Image: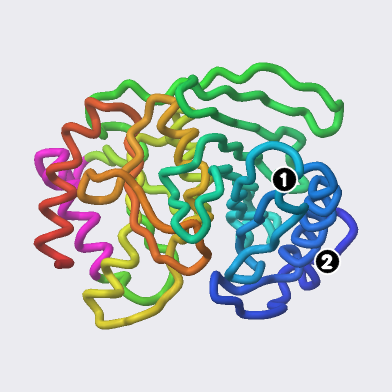
Amino acid sequence: MQTQAVEALARAVRDDEGDTIFGIDVEVEEMLLRYCERWGEEQHFTLVGEGLPTAGVEFGRAGLGGPPFRLLVDPIDGTRGLMFDKRSGWCLMGCAPDRGDDTKLQDVEVAVMTELPTTRQNISDVVWAVAGQPAQAERHDVVRDTQTPLPIVPSTAKDLKHGFASVANFFPGGKTLIAELDEAILNRAMGGWNPEKAEVYSDQYISTGGQLAEVMLGRDRFVLDVRPIVYQKMGVKSALACRPYDLSTWLVGQQAGCVVCDPFGQPLDAPLDVTTNMSFAFYANQELADLLIPIVREEVTRILC
């Protein structure tokens, strides 16, 4: 990024089933494949991710290394913000035992998310989790090459007052419906709108991993993404929305003490693929989830179903 113009990084290279692939994605994709080729000399696994063949890429051979697994990766989640040097992207990775086509997002047992900073930023956060263990984090200084422990402290607030709460509304298509839903949820959660005060704030961070990090690290309290439900309401069969690779690190949020679920309060689940559209909700803590899940469920049903 420090040696190439924005126009080179932001050029559209191809349109895949997952998303549009930009110049910066291609360079990172090549790095990822080279690393996996070396890893495949020791271990048998299948790489599934944005920009790769829909069936995944197999490395190693049967019987090599430990048990075979599937590695679900979004090399850059938040490409659009990062390629214009506006805001950090995130590299998201989730590892699950290989159950073939039956492997699901809920099978993920190890996950790690790594912040990809802008050229104006020397700090990168790395957060990871193993099933059944608390999430952990480090803050890396990429200039000094140092690492320090990073506390993971989600908000303990019991409501949304004076906090960030956002409903994803990034792209054209369905914006009016999403805005109506956003207003309805906030009006009920806050007991109405106070025109004299700015009591709840919105942050349209075009990165699912980034949104999860904001909730885990105490900066946001609630994030909702219902784009697939909106598109269904509009009669649109296929449109850009969150995919399983965007949620490959859901385990990190759960092990950090946050509530990660679908808009109806059910566990997230989907095949480990690059095409399934997904909706989700992130809540900073259980008390906040207990307050908001019934509201979100009822308003999503009323407005979109």
Residue range of the region highlighted in magenta in the rendering: 177-196
Q: Position of residue 83 (x, y in %)?
A: 70, 61
Q: Examine the image and state in which quarter residue 42 appears.
A: top right
Q: What residue is rendered at 36% in x and 51% in y? A: 269
Q: Which residue is label 2 attached to? A: 5
Left or right, residue 132 beside residue 17: left
Amino acid type indicated by mark 2: Ala
Q: Are marks 2 and 1 in contact (CB under 8 Å)?
A: no
Local packing at callout 2 (Cα closer than 10 Å; few below 14, some 14-19, many 20+) is: few
Q: Tag 1, which secondary structure?
A: loop
Q: What residue is rendered at 22% in x and 75% in y? A: 233
Q: Is residue 213 above or below residue 169?
A: above
Q: What residue is rendered at 32% in x and 70% in y? A: 175
Which label was assigned to residue 63? 1
Q: Decide which of tag 2 and tag 1 comes sooner along the chain.
A: 2
Q: Closer to the camera, 270 or 150? A: 270
**Disc 2/disc 1 C-alpha distance (Å):** 45 Å
Amino acid type indicated by mark 1: Gly
